[in-house]
Image (cartoon, grey):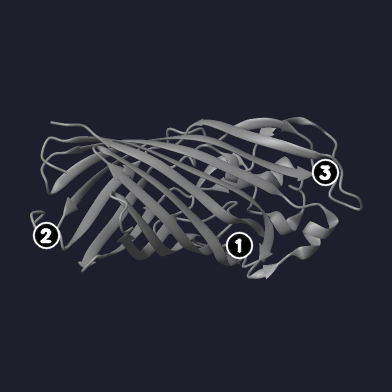
Amino acid sequence: MGKGTWQFNAQLRALRSDDHYNGTVYQEQRDRIGNYVINTQTMLDLGLTYAWTEQFNLSLAVPVVSASWSLPTPTAPVPGPRYRQEGRGIGDISVSGRYWLFDTEQTKHNVQVGLGIKLPTGNSEARYVYPDITGKNHALKAIDISAQPGDGGTAAILDVQGFQVVKKVFLFGGFTYLVNPKDTNDTPSIIAGLGLSANPAYAGLLVNSVPDQYMIRGGAAVPVPKVKGLSVSLALRLEGLPQYDLIGGSHGWRRPGRAAFVESGLVYTKGNYAFNLNVPAIFYRNRLPNAYTNAPGDATFPEFIVLAGVSYRFKK
């Protein structure tokens, strides 16, 4: 981006998770019985970037979240009605600065490093009316952590991106890590919401954790012959939520795990506009044991994620 240039970005992320895994083992009985969780997440990330210089830019990102979590209750012996919990609103806003390490006049390769802050602007204690695990005692309670618009923590964003051009092939890679020092946010977890607080197996899991998160991605893109402005890409993508945070405690309720995807994509540029569509398809899932107790747990994973976006670069 040229000095003094502004760019607007809108990126949509949508997924549905309903396949349960304990470790790397598919819990097919949940599907057979019908007591599986359905988790949907849709986020529209609105961003604005200003190029302070050609080397350094500042970005503001404002996520708009719509998510849900549902479970049939009672879960046994015969699953009852499915009750849906919903969380909507502005998520956690972030501000980041990024710097190109090499001269931007050459376009064959470069590495960009970034540092940002994520603010606890999203609601981390959204509530919805739903019953306990027996299907009774409907009440207004905190929804599942996966549907909360925010996590309640102030976090640092560490970011490294790079590219190398080899003839007509554009190689790219990146790593982003969210450092969340806060231990818990005191919001009652789904364990408490389902009425399982008295079970000693869930001791210490009655409030939500504020976890770190990370994403690693790398691949290649090539232009499509005879179609000006269109390129296709293929990448590997790893997303994860660790058992233990880099800084601070990792108590409370979290679902640690990681998932790997093969990501196919399209990018089309015309004038000041750029459009992208990427579809990561999952091939590896691992729900890690709970922190400290190392007790196994399960979590749902999506078969694929839809990422679609548009950007517009304003003329100086």
**Disc on the earlier residue, 3 or 1:** 3
Marks 3 and 1, Cα distance to the nearest angstrom?
24 Å
Q: Which residue sits furthest right?
A: 77
Q: SS for tag 3?
A: loop
Q: SS for tag 2?
A: loop
Q: Position of residue 145 (x, y in %)?
A: 59, 44
- Disc nearest the viewer among 2 and 1: 2
Q: Which of the image's four quarters has the C terminus? A: top left
Give the left or right position of residue 79, taking residue 55 as reference.
right
Instruction: Tell me the kind of residue under disc 3.
Output: Thr
Give the left or right position of residue 296, taking residue 249 as reference.
right
Instruction: Name which residue lies at 36% across and 65% down.
Output: 218
Return the residue at label 1: 290
Of residues 206 and 140, the one nearer the viewer is 140
Q: Is residue 277 above or below residue 282?
A: above
Residue 66 appears in the figure: yes
Q: Position of residue 71 (x, y in %)?
A: 75, 45
Marks 2 and 3, Cα distance to the nearest angstrom?
57 Å
**Label 2 crowding class (10 Å Cα cut-off): few <14, some 14-19, many 20+?**
few
Give the left or right position of residue 42, taking residue 154 as reference.
right
Instruction: Tell me the kind of residue under disc 1.
Output: Asn
Of residues 249 and 289, the one nearer the viewer is 289
Instruction: Name which residue lies at 52% across and 37% down.
Output: 149
Q: Is residue 31 above or below residue 3?
A: below
Q: SS for tag 1?
A: loop
Disc assigned to residue 102: 2
Disc assigned to residue 73: 3
Disc assigned to residue 139: none
**Disc on the earlier residue, 2 or 3:** 3
Quarter assignment of residue 103: bottom left
**Disc on the earlier residue, 2 or 1:** 2
